[in-house]
Amino acid sequence: MKITFLLDRDNNWIESFTQEYINLKKVGDISYNHFDVKGNDIVFILGYTKVLDEDFLHSNKLNLVVHESDLPKRKGFSPVQWQILEGKNEIIFTLFEAQKEIDSGDIYLQKKVKFSGYELFDEIRNIQGKETLNLIDEFLSQYPNIVPKKQIGDETIYPKRKDKDDMLDIDKSIREQFNHFRIANNDEYPLWFEIDGHKYNLKIEKAD
C-alpha cells in the first residue's frame, strides 16, 4: 500500500511522533504539501491547517483524520483543550474519513483516552501524539477488513481559540482555574491577566 502522512510545518507538534512510528513500522512517508499527495491508498491528515478541496480528496483512495472528540459532538478547533477546560479527563479519539464538510465523515475507530487531571500542556501533547498514532496503528492492523459507520446525533462545534480565551479571572482561585493552567502553552499562548489596565503574562511548570 502507498501511505502518506500529511503534516503541517506551521503546526508540526505531531511530527516527531509520526516519524518515530514510520521508523518503527517501516510504513508510509511524510509530506507537508497536499498538492504533492496524489494516488495514495491511504492518507493520514494530522494537524494540517490548510484547506483541502474535493480535488485532493478524490485524488486518494482514503483520507483519514484523527479528531479528539466523540463525533458528531465537539467538532471544530482545539477539542482537547476545550474539553479539559470543561473538566473532562476522559476524551474520545475518533479516526474518520475526511470530507468537504468539517469533521463530518464516516467513523472507522474510536478510543477512550484517560488523563490524570494533573498533566500540563507538554504532557497532554505527548499523550495526544502517542494515542493518535496508536489509533492509526490499530486501523492499519485491521485494514481493509474494517467497516466505517455513519455519525449519529446532533453536532456541536468548538470555535477557534483566541487571545481572550487565555485570560485568567483575577477574582477566582488557582484551584478554580487549574484546568486553564493545564492547557496553557507557555511559549506561544501564555495565560494572562489584567489589573487596573495593566496586562501580565503567567507561565506554569511542574516543580518536580
Image: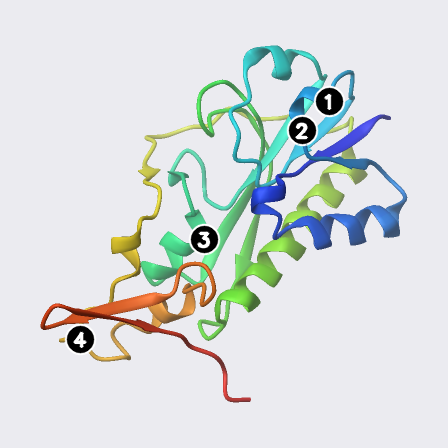
Looking at the rendered structure, the secondary structure element under dot 2 is loop
How far apart are labels 3 and 1 at the CA level?
30 Å
Q: Position of residue 128 (x, y in %)?
A: 58, 56
Colour scheme: rainbow
Kind of residue at badge 3 = Val
Residue 28 is drawn in which quadrant?
top right
Work out whether residue 110 can be spotted: no
What label does residue 80 carry, if any? 3
How far apart are labels 1 and 4 at the CA level?
50 Å
Q: Does residue 84 appear to the left or right of 19 in the view shown?
A: left
Residue holding disc 2: 33
Residue placed most toward the observer, 204 or 153: 204
Q: Report the residue at 87% width, 47% height from top.
A: 25
Foreground tag (3 vs 1): 1
Badge 2: few (under 14), some or many (20 or more) residues near its Cα, within 10 Å? Answer: few
Foreground tag (3 vs 4): 4
Residue holding disc 4: 172
Q: Are marks 1 and 2 in contact (CB under 8 Å)?
A: yes
Q: Which is more N-terminal, label 4 or label 2?
A: 2
Q: Report the residue at 40% width, 75% height from top.
A: 203
Badge 4: few (under 14), some or many (20 or more) residues near its Cα, within 10 Å? Answer: few
Residue 56 is drawn in which quadrant?
top right
How far apart are labels 3 and 2 at the CA level?
25 Å
Badge 1: few (under 14), some or many (20 or more) residues near its Cα, within 10 Å? Answer: few
Q: Quadrant of the C terminus?
A: bottom right
Query: Is residue 172 shown above or below 83?
Result: below
Q: Position of residue 99 (x, y in %)?
A: 53, 20
What label does residue 36 carry, if any? 1
